Amino acid sequence: MKAKLLGADIDRLTMDQAIKAITALVRVGKPCRVITLNPEYLYQAVTADSSLLELVRKADLVTADGEGIVWAGRVAGTPFPERVTGIDLMLRLMPKATAEGWRVYLLGSAPGVAEEAAENLRRMHPGLQMAGTHHGYFQPAEEAAVVAEIKQAVPQLLFVALGAPKQEIWIDKYIDEIGPVMAMGVGGSLDVIAG
Ligand code: UDP
């Protein structure tokens, strides 16, 4: 069940249902994308860059991030059961990843932040397997090496913190090369988790 808002199809799911949907995607073992859609992204897609809408169409799962999206769904008569934000979804996936043995890769934010976030996540979830981390301030010339490093680490979950929409564009460009992984943009979440 989806809500159609300004040309974007958004899944009308609870957090629990989103976790189940991602679990099913990971089990299929193909590259897949999750977008937690906020009003800023949608506004930019509609007013300035329609290729961003195309990325929403290509996503396997799109959640309602942001009160503005939840409000618009209600007004359109296609209410969302709840808000599913990037950081909440990411944090809720951690116990699942621990139980399933999924490897987690954190890409983005200033040097040191992803490592710190990984350490905190491991502390919160003993047994969680971190596949690796990399900061988000690499040069275009370094991009191929970053992609190769992620591919070699073979993560099942890849969280990309480059800010929206840069992270969604990055995922679109490289996910097929990386291989069977669930990739999701998480904005400033690593900064928050690093504390
Ligand atoms: N960032 C990055 N590389 C860049 C630009 C941004 O790693 O080239 C990181 C930045 O350090 C921050 C995150 O991306 O951790 C963006 O956070 P913000 O809260 O601005 O993103 P939003 O939630 O607005 O998408």
Image (cartoon, rainbow, N blue to C red):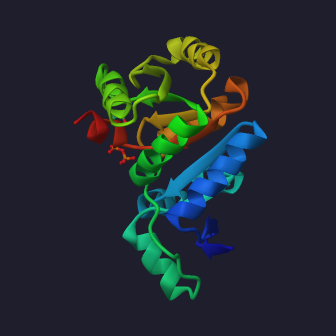
User: What residue is shown at x 62% (from left), y 75% (from top)?
Assistant: 3
The image shows a total of numbered marks equal to 0
Quadrant of res 157: top right
| Residue 71 drawn above or below residue 32 | below
Q: Quadrant of residue 121?
A: top left
Q: Point out residue 93 in the picture as x, y percentages from the top left corner.
A: 50, 46
- Please tell me which residue lies in front, 42 or 85: 85
Residue 183 horizontal side relative to residue 39, left or right: right
Looking at the picture, tell me which residue is in the foreground, 17 or 191: 17
Q: Is residue 135 above or below residue 156?
A: above
Answer yes or no: is residue 53 visible.
Answer: no
Q: Would you place residue 188 above or below residue 15 in this image?
A: above
Give the residue at x 33% y 25%. 119
In the rendered image, is residue 151 in sight? yes
Quadrant where the N terminus lies? bottom right
Instruction: Name the spot of residue 120 as percent of width and height, x first.
Output: 31, 31
* Between 55 and 182, the one nearer to me in the picture: 182
Split into 4 quadrants, where in the image is the C terminus? Answer: top left
Q: Is residue 101 left or right of residue 32?
A: left
Where residue 141 appears, x then y in whole percent? Answer: 53, 12
Counting from the top left corner in percent of width and height, residue 135 is at 39, 22
Q: At x 43% / y 18%, what residue is drawn?
A: 138
- The image quadrant in which ligand 1 is located: top left
What residue lies at 32% left-to-right and 30% top-to-bottom? Answer: 123
